[in-house]
Image: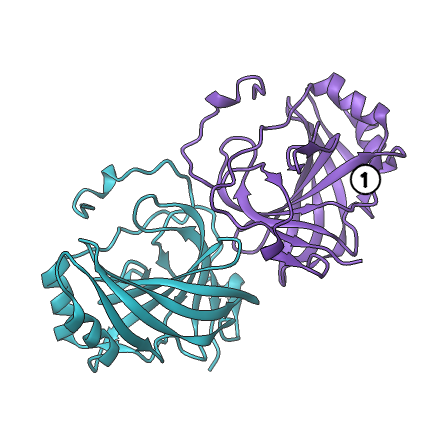
Chain colours: A cyan, B purple
Amino acid sequence: MLNYNNQGNWPNGFGKMQSPIDLSIDEQNQYKEFLPISVDEFYQLNNEIDDGTTIRLTGMGNATVFNREFNFKQIHFHTPAEHTVNGEAAPFEIHLVHQNAIGQTVVVALLVQIGNADASLQEIINNFVPNEETDVSINLTEWIPNLANGFHYAGSLTTPPLTENVEWIVITNSPMTVSQNQVDWFVKQFGNNNRQCQAINNRKIEYYENK
Amino acid sequence: MLNYNNQGNWPNGFGKMQSPIDLSIDEQNQYKEFLPISVDEFYQLNNEIDDGTTIRLTGMGNATVFNREFNFKQIHFHTPAEHTVNGEAAPFEIHLVHQNAIGQTVVVALLVQIGNADASLQEIINNFVPNEETDVSINLTEWIPNLANGFHYAGSLTTPPLTENVEWIVITNSPMTVSQNQVDWFVKQFGNNNRQCQAINNRKIEYYENK
């Protein structure tokens, strides 16, 4: 199982485009518009897996991302958030992994704040069976906002094989919140499972915000 | 210098998305339309380098590729072609490397047939100085056709570091041809410099053709 206390020893034959990173607004790459992402077919989760370090669910759904069609593949969770903003980590981060017809990967990350408990996340918690894979039927309706603000950059998977040239969209204004109880449940089950922030090197980070 | 007679020993910590590959038309992924690529600002070459295994030139230019803006970065040449079509290699392949604002890479490959000598390529040959880097001023006008047919898939760089998740557009109907003399000049200078075709694994290869 992946050991988050021993990240320096993770296999990584890769270069200078690793994730997560600490995000901040670069005036040179700031766009006064919403992120060009729209959900075309709402995401439906049908399989839930205890992968040892987090819960992973697979399902169906479709989104248009920067003018290209992507299929939703899987979703999983990190506590605390992996991407930080100006050095601050949100308590929870959700990764929605997508692929297009030729196998390119876009991960949509939601940085989630404490607030009301989320009903869909509670269904995921209630359906969890340790060490098992279970059939579920859970709809995600408003996790990806229609009018999304946030960051866009090229990085990597945050767990081995840490594959690079993954396209990241990190949404900072999801209306979805989680309760402290829900966060506590994840921490009790899995401990902290955030990879440390990696060097940005000479990457450009785009920021999109409209009001 | 890269040894094309010893490709099995090239450093490669990567996976199942290597390039080049043998291309063929998959009925399931065939589109009766042109490749969505258009040159917005013609490419201008201003620096020519003998990199030991090929000529590499850098310059400026802009293209819209699958609805996203990319900047032209560099161009280089392979004899014979690296990508084959139904097992057949064209005598010459040109790689036009592009990047977008967040550093994603698209390589536009032209599979080039024998015919009239190309004037811009002859300028490149005439400006070549072994082991040197030289300033040049060469315009590429019609190498990427306005109405392009060809393949689209996710692969890798074809020289170390063989980085994966590079987006390939392999154009099969460039109006540009090279003379046998021009091909012979490259072979005499560099020898064969084509990486062998790699396993496709479970990748989907899209094919675009309109008439």
Task: Report if residue B174 is visible in the image.
Answer: yes
**Residue furthest front in the image:** B27
Q: How far across and how far down the image is residue A147, in percent?
A: 45, 79
Residue B8 picture location, percent across and down: 48, 22
Query: Mark 1 falls on what kind of element?
Result: strand
Closest to the observer, B138 or A181:
A181
Q: What residue sits right under mark 1 in the picture?
A: B138
Q: In which quarter of the image is residue B44?
A: top right
- Amino acid under disc 1: Ile
Left or right of A126, for residue B173: right
Which residue is located at x 83 percent, y 41 percent?
Answer: B176
Of all residues, the one furthest to the right in this rendering is B116
Label 1: how many Cα within 10 Å (few below 14, some 14–19, many 20+): many
x%, y% of residue A12?
33, 38
> Is the residue A185 above or below the residue B7 in the image?
below
Q: Nearer the viewer, residue B208 or A87?
A: B208
Eyeballing the image, is A87 above or below B19? Answer: below
Counting the numbered discs, the total is 1
Query: In this image, B48 relative to A145: left or right?
Result: right
* Residue visible at 63% across and 63% down in the picture: B67
Q: Can residue B56 be seen in this view?
A: no
Q: Decide if residue A71 is on the left or right side of residue A136.
A: right
What is the chain identity of the residue bearing mark 1?
A: B
Judge left or right: residue B192 versus residue A51. right
Q: In this view, does B62 lie above or below A15?
A: below
Q: From the top left corner, tell me how far across and down residue A146 is, in percent.
A: 44, 80
Q: Which residue is drawn at 82% across and 26% down?
A: B182
